[in-house]
Amino acid sequence: MDKKSTLIGVILLCAAFYFMVNPSQRAANRTDERKLEDSSKARQEYVEKSSKPASLGNKSSAYAPESNIKEEILSLKSDTLNVHLTNRGGAIRDVELLKYRRQQDSKAPYVFNEGDKDTLAMAMAFEDAGRPLTLIRNFSLAKADDKTVVYKYIMPGKWEITREFSLASGRELYSPYTIKVSTRVKNISKETVSGEKIYLTLGSLPPTAGDIYGSNLAVGLYDGDNITFAKSSLFTKSGGWFLGLGSTEGIPDKKLDVPNSIWGTVKNQFFAAVFVPENKTGSSGFAEPILINPRAESAKMRNAIFGYMGFDMGTLEPGQTWELDGKYYVGPKDITSLASLGARQDLVMDFGWSSFVSKPLALLMGIIHSAIEPIAGSWAWGWAIVILTLIVKAVLWPLTAAQIRSSQKMLKLASGPIKEIREKYKGDQQKIGQETMKIYSEYGVNPLAGCLPALIQIPVFIGLFYMLQSSSDIRFAHFLWIDDLSQPDTISALPSIFGIPLHILPILNGIITFVQMSITPMPSTDKTQAIVFRFLPLLFLFLFYSFPSGLILYWCVQSSLGIVQALIVKTGSNKMELVKKEKKGPSFMERLQMAAENAEKAKAEGNFENMSFRERLAAVQKKAKEERQKMMDERLKGTLYEKRKKNPGGRSTKPKR
């Protein structure tokens, strides 16, 4: 291996180590954050230090918030939700998700929109100075029972506002996490009102421990074709992905210009709120950060995200009423529940380009889990990942079988005819390549056949990464020694190394991959390729070290099956007999080889007709350059600038006068 290749390898390993250390250090910080949230004193400090949305600070506006409102909380409760409503803004204070725990070791439910008292969900906001300003006023209670709560507020000489909240049931039930929201704004002035814009707040969600890059915490709007996200990473200063490359400055807020938006959402790694208006379409949106944990060392963990969905009111004559009804989903990021809402709400999962892989894998894993849960119990999601891996491997087996046959032939050829060619044409790499391709063609071997299964594995792996990273199902899911399949498998009893927590599964995967690489046939005798091949387990260890343990579990099973495949290749190659392919005309490899030889021959003979377009162009340019140089030499003959040959003594001849 030359020095250049060695240098590149060292740089890559340093980069991989950088990526390993940073996420692992942040993982240690996340442990401190969880400890901070566990204490009641810290929790109180957390709430007191929560910053209000910037839109609440305009005291001179006609919609400025009132102070000293005595808050009264009412509840609407079902088997899945406990919705707390407040008279401060006639909106949702917070929502308890009764089937999801706040933390691993706690029975308390997860709380959506948990923050200070001015951070409301489904509150009204009016546009003021180009941005939404939440209406924090004392709404009177007009109706309250165990199914419906109605609030009213009158802004003298301007608006009469009615807000109604109820839990959906029967045919109205989209999912058990749905809340019906109705808003009425009546013009009680004596003048026509036009150009007003009304927003509904989508609520707030905090970052999760696994979202170390801030890619899952976002506000989004969907217009029927595309979904536009404003992610929390926009609001934090970034030092870049490596040595300052890609660094950005954080912005204070983000406006989303999405006309005719069908629904809006605020989401984090595992939970989401989605508002779907029934009789209107939105015109824009807004996203802004809310400081919740100023102590966090990672900037990505300091802010929650708060969202708005905006609507154009149009023109309202005196006495006319503007109406807006809709369904408000507050629950897990479960692809089945979101898809049941009926307007592509499954896009909230944010699988990106890998959706064509992630979506069917998520549905299949859910089916497997449902089938084995009565037997596997709390380990059901771990076994579902193992069984899913076996199914993926079985589907790819026809391609893998072709790879095995090709590897067996190439291994046999490498120790026979190809070895002889390398010895015969030693030092002439071009000739070795040509003769090797001829041998492959004679025996019907396609050297690219082994690459296809590996190429197909890449989108499957990426699809699984996005699916497991954002699946609320594997949150807190146990398997073997793993406490949470959505997080790296840190064991608190084990010591850290230089501040880096010890993750068992990536290390085990590195060992399995090393064994797989050690027994995998290497048809090529190139030393550089062999060294790179041997370094792959170490590279995988670095890259996978902070990945979710559910994903590493998949790769461990995949690598173990790869060992079985390698043993089949090694055993079969010893028994295989090489048989030349019957000639039925030139194969693809032969045609490729003939084309290369013809091009070389034409170039050597100067046969212009047999050259490719690029070769013709290069030949014409070369010829033109030679002609220009020849003309220049003719002009300089007999002058001081004429090119002269040096004499044997090394001295130049005297210039002609």
Image (spheres, rainbow, N blue to C red):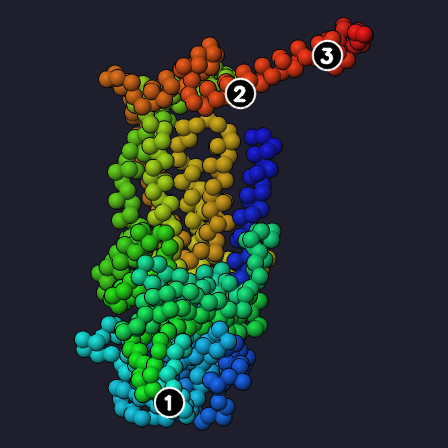
* Residue occupying image coordinates x 43% and y 37%: 518
Q: Which of marks 2 and 3 is nearer the N terminus?
A: 2
Q: In which quarter of the image is residue 452?
A: top left
Residue situated furthest front in the rendering: 191
From mark 3 to mark 1, how far is it between C-alphas?
Answer: 98 Å
Eye-nearest disc, 3 or 1: 1
Q: Height in image: 489 above or below 585?
A: below
Q: In which quarter of the image is the N terminus?
A: top right
Graded by Cα atoms within 10 Å as few (under 14), some (14 to 19) or many (20 or more), the crowding at tag 2 reads few
Task: Determine whether label 2 and label 1 are within 8 Å by CB.
Answer: no
Q: How far apart are marks 2 and 3 (CA)?
A: 25 Å
For the residue labelled by badge 3, is the local secondary structure a helix, a strand or a loop? Answer: loop
The residue at 38%/89% (across/down) is 189
* Quadrant of the frame with the C terminus: top right
Q: Mark 3 points at which residue?
A: 642
Q: Confirm whether residue 352 shows in the render.
A: yes
Relative depth, front residue between 561 and 82: 82
| Residue linked to disc 1 | 190
> The residue under label 1 is which amino acid type?
Lys
